Image: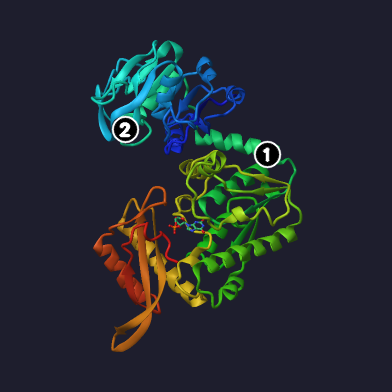
C-alpha cells in the first residue's frame, strides 16, 4: 500500500521542521526537501500536497531561491507560506513589493471563512506575522481570502488550480487557529486520510528491516538513551539474535542507570538479543586521572569509548550492519545544509570510522523525537526509559568540575538521585532538563559540633524547547529546601548546595 505524503519544500525558513511536525500531527506522513529538488524526483514521491516554507529572502534578490514553475502545473495542491506565498504570487503574475511597514508578531487577520482553507476559523483571528515584503497584488485568477490593515493580501487562493497562500505562519503556536488551517489543507484540500500512526510505522519498519538485513549480522551501540533503545528494540523484533547490542558502562552514568539498562536489554529482559555490558569504569577513571580541562575530558571519554567498542566489535567479528539512532531533525539539518551549527557532541556518531561493517542502518531517520517516544511505547519499552531527559554522552564526566574521581562520581550520583526523586515527588512539570553537578569548591561548614571542609553541589534546572537557548527554572523554594536538606544529610562529603540561576547564553546547560 502506498503511504500518503505531503512534501515541504524548504526555502530556508526557520520553521521548516515545525511545518513537517504539524502535518504529522494530522497523522499524515511528511518529508522536507530542498526548494530546488528535481521535478521528476518530486513527482516520483507522488505527494498528495506540497507546502512552500518561508525564507529570509526577497523574491527580487539576486540569489533568491526559486522553484521550477512547472510545479504549479502538477495538479497537486500547493500551500505557500510567507516567502512561499510571495514566490507563488511572483511566479504567477502577481506583484510583490516592500511593505510600507514590516509586520512582526501577533497580528489580527480578517479571513474569509467561507473558503476551504479557513473553514471553521474565526473571521478575525490572531496570526503570527514576520515579513518585510508583501503581496501587493494577487495574480489574475486568484481571490484574496485574508487581509490586515497593513497587508492587502494576507491570504489568496485559486481553488480551481488547487493553489493556496498565506502571508502569516500557520505552523507556529502564536497563530491561534493555525493547526485548523493546516488540517483543512492536508485533510480537506489534499484529501489525505490521515493514517500515519506509530503502530503502522513499527509494523512496516520491522518487515522492511527483516528484508534488508536478511541473514546478516547487526551491531548496535546502546547507550540507554531513548533513540538507541528504540532503534535496538526495532532491530531485535526484526532479526532477533542476529543483533548484538554493546552497552559500555563508563562509570559516568546516573545512579543505577547501568543496571536499569541491563534489566531491560539483558538476558532477564523481555527482548531476545545478544547483550554485552562492558564494565569499563576503572579504565575511564584512570584515563581521566589528573585531567581538569573540560574539552580534554570530553576528548578522552569519546576516544576511550571508541576503543572499548572497537575491542568488543573485534571479538564479535566482522558485522554486516551498524545501527545508528539518527533521527529526522539530524537528517534535515545535514541534508539541507542550512541550519545553524550545533555544538559538536560526543555520541556514538563517531563510531563508523573505526569499526568494520558494510552498511549503516538508521531505522529512526524519518522520525521526530516525540514520534520516537511513541514508537518506543508501542514496542513495550518502559516509560521511564522512553521519557528520559537528555543525558550527554560523556555523562557525569562533564558534570564534575575539575578532576573526575570515583569518589566525586559517587557524590554526584547520590545528589542527583535525591534531586530527581524530590522533583518527581513534588510533581514539578515542564522542566526540559534538571540535574545535580559537583563544583570543585570546598568550603567550611559545621555539622553537629564538628568543623567540615566539604564540596558544594550545584543544582540546575532549565526550561527550553531546543536546547540552543534556555532559562533557569524557578523551582519552588520548598522543593529546593527539601532537596538541600536531604543532600547535606545523606551525601557524604557535601556541606553546601547551590542553585544555578544562569540562563543559556551566557552559560550552557551542562556545568563543565
Ligand atoms: P549545552 O551544555 O551545550 O547542552 O548547553 C545542550 C544540550 O546538549 C546536551 N549535551 C550533550 N549531548 N553529547 C550528547 O549527546 C554531548 O557531548 C553533550 N553535551 C551536551 C546537554 O545535556 C543538553 O541537553
Quadrant placement of the N terminus: top right
Q: Does 474 sit left or right of 396 as displayed?
A: left
Placement of 194 over or under 421, stated as above or below: above
Placement of 160 over or under 428, stated as above or below: above
The residue singled out by tag 1 in the image is 210
Query: Where is residue 235 shown, x and y percent of the image?
Result: 63, 45
Q: Does 117 sit left or right of 279 as displayed?
A: left
Query: Where is residue 114 shown, x and y percent of the image?
Result: 30, 15
- Kindly indicate the quadrant of the structure image that contains residue 417: bottom left
- Kindly indicate the quadrant of the structure image that contains residue 246: bottom right
The residue singled out by tag 2 in the image is 129
* Colour basis: rainbow
Q: Is residue 117 visible?
A: yes
Label 1 CA crowd tier, 10 Å (few <14, some 14–19, many 20+): some
Q: Secondary structure at mark 2?
A: strand
Placement of 126 over or under 443, stated as above or below: above
Query: Where is residue 32 shown, x and y percent of the image?
Result: 51, 33
Q: Is mark 1 within 8 Å of ligand 1?
A: no
Label 2 CA crowd tier, 10 Å (few <14, some 14–19, many 20+): many
Q: Does 18 sit left or right of 330 as displayed?
A: left
Amino acid at each position: 500500500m502506498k503511504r500518503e505524503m505531503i512534501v515541504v519544500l524548504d526555502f530556508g525558513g526557520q520553521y521548516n521542521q515545525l511545518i513537517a511536525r504539524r502535518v504529522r500531527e494530522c497523522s499524515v506522513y511528511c518529508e522536507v526537501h530542498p526548494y530546488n529538488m528535481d521535478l521528476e524526483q518530486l513527482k516520483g514521491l507522488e505527494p498528495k500536497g506540497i507546502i512552500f516554507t518561508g525564507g529570509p529572502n526577497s523574491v527580487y534578490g539576486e540569489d533568491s531561491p526559486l522553484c521550477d514553475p512547472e510545479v504549479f502545473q502538477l495538479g497537486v495542491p500547493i500551500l505557500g507560506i510567507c516567502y512561499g506565498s510571495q514566490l507563488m504570487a511572483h511566479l504567477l503574475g502577481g506583484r510583490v513589493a516592500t511593505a510600507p511597514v514590516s509586520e512582526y508578531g501577533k497580528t489580527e487577520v480578517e479571513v474569509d471563512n467561507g473558503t476551504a482553507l479557513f473553514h471553521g476559523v474565526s473571521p478575525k483571528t490572531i496570526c503570527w506575522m514576520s515579513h518585510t515584503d508583501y503581496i501587493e497584488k494577487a495574480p489574475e485568477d486568484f481571490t484574496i481570502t485574508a487581509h490586515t490593515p497593513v497587508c492587502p493580501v494576507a491570504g489568496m487562493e485559486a481553488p480551481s488550480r488547487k493553489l493556496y497562500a498565506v502571508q502569516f505562519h500557520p505552523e507556529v503556536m502564536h497563530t491561534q487557529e493555525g493547526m485548523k488551517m493546516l488540517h483543512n489543507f492536508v485533510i480537506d484540500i489534499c484529501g489525505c486520510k490521515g493514517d500515519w500512526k506509530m503502530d503502522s510505522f513499527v509494523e512496516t519498519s520491522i518487515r522492511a528491516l527483516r528484508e534488508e538485513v536478511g541473514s546478516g549480522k547487526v551491531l548496535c551501540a546502546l547507550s540507554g538513551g531513548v533513540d538507541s533503545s528504540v532503534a535496538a528494540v526495532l532491530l531485535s523484533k526484526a532479526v532477533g539474535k542476529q543483533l548484538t547490542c554493546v552497552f559500555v558502562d563508563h562509570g559516568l552514568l546516573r545512579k543505577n542507570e547501568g543496571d536499569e539498562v541491563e534489566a531491560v536489554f539483558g538476558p532477564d529482559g523481555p527482548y531476545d538479543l545478544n547483550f554485552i555490558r562492558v564494565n569499563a569504569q576503572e579504565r575511564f577513571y584512570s584515563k581521566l586521572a589528573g585531567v581538569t580541562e573540560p574539552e580534554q575530558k570530553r576528548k578522552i571519554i569519546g576516544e576511550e569509548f571508541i576503543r572499548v567498542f572497537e575491542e568488543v566489535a573485534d571479538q564479535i567479528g566482522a558485522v554486516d550492519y551498524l545501527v545508528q539512532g539518527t533521527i529526522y531533525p539530524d537528517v534535515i539539518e545535514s541534508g539541507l545544509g542550512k541550519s545553524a551549527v550545533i555544538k559538536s557532541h560526543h555520541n556514538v556518531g563517531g563510531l563508523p570510522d573505526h569499526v568494520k561493517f558494510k552498511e549503516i542502518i538508521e531505522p529512526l531517520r524519518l522520525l521526530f523525537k516525540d514520534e520516537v517516544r511513541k514508537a518506543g511505547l508501542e514496542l513495550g519499552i518502559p516509560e521511564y526509559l522512553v521519557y528520559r531527559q537528555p543525558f550527554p554522552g560523556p555523562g557525569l564526566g562533564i558534570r564534575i568540575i575539575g578532576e573526575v574521581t570515583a569518589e566525586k562520581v559517587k557524590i554526584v550520583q547520590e545528589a542527583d538521585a535525591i534531586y530527581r526523586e524530590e522533583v518527581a515527588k513534588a510533581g514539578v512539570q515542564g522542566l526540559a532538563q534538571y540535574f545535580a553537578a559537583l563544583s570543585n569548591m570546598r568550603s567550611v561548614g559545621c555539622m553537629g559540633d564538628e568543623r567540615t571542609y566539604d564540596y558544594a553541589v550545584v543544582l540546575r534546572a532549565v526550561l527550553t524547547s531546543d536546547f540552543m537557548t534556555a532559562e533557569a527554572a524557578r523551582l519552588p523554594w520548598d522543593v529546593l529546601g527539601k532537596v538541600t536538606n536531604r543532600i547535606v544529610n545523606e551525601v557524604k562529603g557535601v556541606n553546601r548546595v547551590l542553585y544555578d540561576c544562569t540562563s543559556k547564553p551566557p552559560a550552557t546547560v551542562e556545568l563543565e
